[in-house]
Image (cartoon, helix red, strand yellow):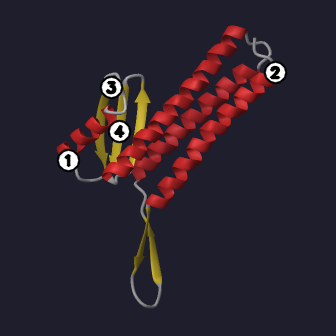
Amino acid sequence: MINKQNLWFITLFSLIMVLSIYYLTMSEDTLSTLNVNNTNNNGTEVVISENETLVALKVADEEALVSKIEELQNVLLNNSSSLEEKNHAYDELQEINKKESTKETIVKKIKDTYKLDSFVSIEENNIKITIASSKHDTKLANNIIRSVQELFNETKYITVKFGS
């Protein structure tokens, strides 16, 4: 049985884990999407270019994730919730943490290998990858699919979409 102290620890640990993944991702993305261009001797023009599609996808995904975590934490902290409901909520929080970790691994692999910004969405065995590139290259998409599949022992259904 989960007592209050263990429940708080689990809740706070899950929250810290998700937030740390979020902040690590955002700082990396922010640094990689800044472009500095020197225009002339009089001054420096700074151009910030972030892929709007990726930013919109990341924001929507983050909002859904935060609302789901809040919902699960409410179940965990509710005294009227049964032990079975609390265990189910805890298992879902662990699954969310695992999925977020997998997403970060895939994004990092794509960034390191192909020097491309990407957004990853995982639903069961389906992995959807959106690449920040206006050039639609089937050979690149196939290479990305192969390199991502290497991360898993079981077969995943991986799709790559190029967004500008």
* Residue 108 horizontal side relative to residue 68, left or right: left
Q: Which residue is mark 2?
A: 4
Closer to us: mark 1 or mark 3? 3
Q: Which mark is residue 156?
A: 3
Tag 2 near tag 3, CB within 8 Å: no
Q: CA distance from mark 2 to mark 3?
A: 39 Å
4 vs 63, nearest the viewer = 4
Where is residue 151? Give x, y as percent: 36, 33
Q: CA distance from mark 1 to mark 4?
A: 14 Å
Q: Which residue is mark 4?
A: 129
Tell me the kind of residue under disc 2: Lys
Q: Residue at x 27, y 36 (%)?
A: 145
Label total for image: 4
Task: Please identify the quarter of the rendering in which residue 69 is found.
Answer: top right
Along the polypeptide, which appears first: circle 1 or circle 4? Answer: 4
Q: Which residue is mark 1?
A: 137
Query: Is disc 4 placed on a helix, strand or loop?
Result: strand
152 vs 65, nearest the viewer = 152
